[in-house]
Image: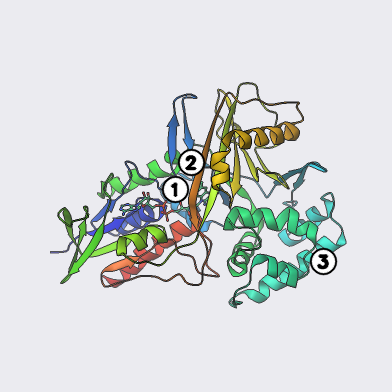
Amino acid sequence: MKYPIAIIGGGLCGLTSAIRLAEKGHDVHLYEAAPALGGRTRSFYDSRVNEWVDNGPHLLIGAYKATRRLLESIGADGNITWQRSLKLSLWDEQRGHFCLAPSPYLPFPLALMAALYRLPGHHVDSLLSLLRLDRSMKDRSGRKVAVATVKEWMEAEKISPALQRDLIEPLCLGVMNEPMQGADCNSFASVLREAFASHDHARLGWFNKPLSEAVIKPLEQRFQSLGGSIFTGTTIRSIEQAGNSCQLHTSQNSQNTTGPYRNVIIALPAYARNRLLGVEEPVKTGPITNVHLWFEADIPLPDSLIGGIGTRGQWYFNVSSQTARDGAQHICAVISAAGSAEEAGNKAELIQIICEELAMLSGIETVQPIHSKIVIEQRATVLVNAKHQRMNIGMIIDASEAPLPGDFPATIEAAVLRGEEVAKSLCFQQ
Ligand SMILES: Cc1cc2nc3c(=O)[nH]c(=O)nc-3n(C[C@H](O)[C@H](O)[C@H](O)COP(=O)(O)OP(=O)(O)OC[C@H]3O[C@@H](n4cnc5c(N)ncnc54)[C@H](O)[C@@H]3O)c2cc1C
């Protein structure tokens, strides 16, 4: 008799591998500690505004090919709104609102250069910097440089301060969740190479429904329609391998057991995997702070997504316009690589700062929210680290979030890719 396959972790990685394995006819059991699936792509109900709200809005780039393929395959691709071609809306106090908008009618590299030249504060040195960056990115394909940060890379290539400030730093914070000073240059170069490959890859996308509805529910329904079993509210405490099968323990004293399973896939962030396997190694993570604000009177933002330069809020999402929702206007300011105790302790001050920035951005005197919610995810992403390793032990297969230098950083796309790869490797073995 063939035993089923168990997956620990009901986030995007676990759900992807569960679907891909079930599609190949495998009997799959998915275990999730929380009461609902979703992991870090989850939504909560806010009764005050009668809305499902995401822990934090998620931004996508066209280069997220695996994510697009997955959502297309379950008929949920319409839940993402894609820009027709890249339009990066930016704002700072001196220059006001401006856009990097490469013409879709020119080849992408040429269009990017022309768009950059038109940005306030950019001159020929930005164009020369872009050419040097392009050459250096191409040099790097397949080659890894030891211990070099994005900042070191920018300095080595003499990238102009203006290009670093307006393009590199916002992108680095957005995809790496780390400032240039600490972010791994090989992983960042992989993202840039993919993102700058074409107009299609460079454009931005966002979910037009709450994450639970846009992504998680369709994936859950697809898995169930394939006969998969879901066990929510079930924390796996340890895994025991004996003979040709594994058992999962759901209590500390190993009294409550489930199984047998022929393979167990770990679809967790690396720190949760280490806890499960009893590994002591610490894992570096990056926080993200999300300041959700609701306003009675509409704040006239110049775009539905704006990157702030030199502002506390790094990205401003006009959630109401992105999701075409009525009612109080919902705006979320995202601060990557920030989630300190200071932020947690000074929520009123943080809201005040964000409101002042919103007032400047929209050109109105003062803005006053009718409701607010700050979500600080202290361990939003596992940071790229050369010390990470896969912990495949016997029948245990490790698909955890533990990016190495050069890998795609911890993102939705990386989670889907890990889920697909692990399912493929298991199907290949059987
Ligand atoms: C606020 C925020 C904003 C983000 N913004 C972006 C963005 O704009 N773009 C982007 O691409 N990415 C973004 N990310 C990153 C992205 O959400 C994650 O990289 C991705 O969702 C990780 O998916 P996962 O399945 O690997 O892990 P998770 O989503 O963490 O799933 C793991 C699951 O395992 C469960 N679990 C843990 N331990 C156990 C156990 N012992 N037994 C059973 N279950 C267990 C957890 O409850 C969780 O549901 C953001 C993340 C956060 C938090």
Residue of label 2: 55
**Mark toward the viewer: 1 or 3:** 1
Q: Real-space Cα distance between discs 1 and 3?
A: 39 Å
Which SS class for mark 3?
helix
Can residue 74 be seen in the rendering of this structure? yes
Is the C-beta separation of discs 2 and 1 under 8 Å? yes
Q: Is residue 176 left or right of residue 119?
A: left
Residue of label 1: 40
Residue furthest to the right in view is: 124
Residue toward you, 373 or 233: 373
Q: In the image, what residue type sits under mark 2?
A: Asn
Q: Earlier in the sequence, mark 2 or mark 1?
A: 1
Name the quadrant of the C terminus.
bottom left
Above/below status of 173 relative to 91: below
Find out if the beta carbon at label 2 lies less than 8 Å from the nearest ligand 1 atom.
yes
Residue toward you, 203 or 175: 175
Residue 34, x across and y down, in percent: 33, 44
Residue 181, x across and y down, in percent: 65, 63
Find out if the beta carbon at label 1 lies less than 8 Å from the nearest ligand 1 atom.
yes
Q: Residue at x 60, y 70 (%)?
A: 186
Can residue 207 be seen in the rendering of this structure? no
Q: Residue at x 42, y 40 (%)?
A: 212
Q: In the image, what residue type sits under mark 3?
A: Leu
Residue of label 3: 128
Name the quadrant of the N terminus.
bottom left
Q: Real-space Cα distance between discs 2 and 1?
A: 8 Å
| Numbered badge on residue 257 | none
Residue toward you, 148 or 330: 148
Question: Which image quarter: residue 159?
Answer: bottom right
Is the C-beta separation of discs 1 and 3 under 8 Å? no
Which SS class for mark 2?
loop
Above/below status of 43 relative to 386: above
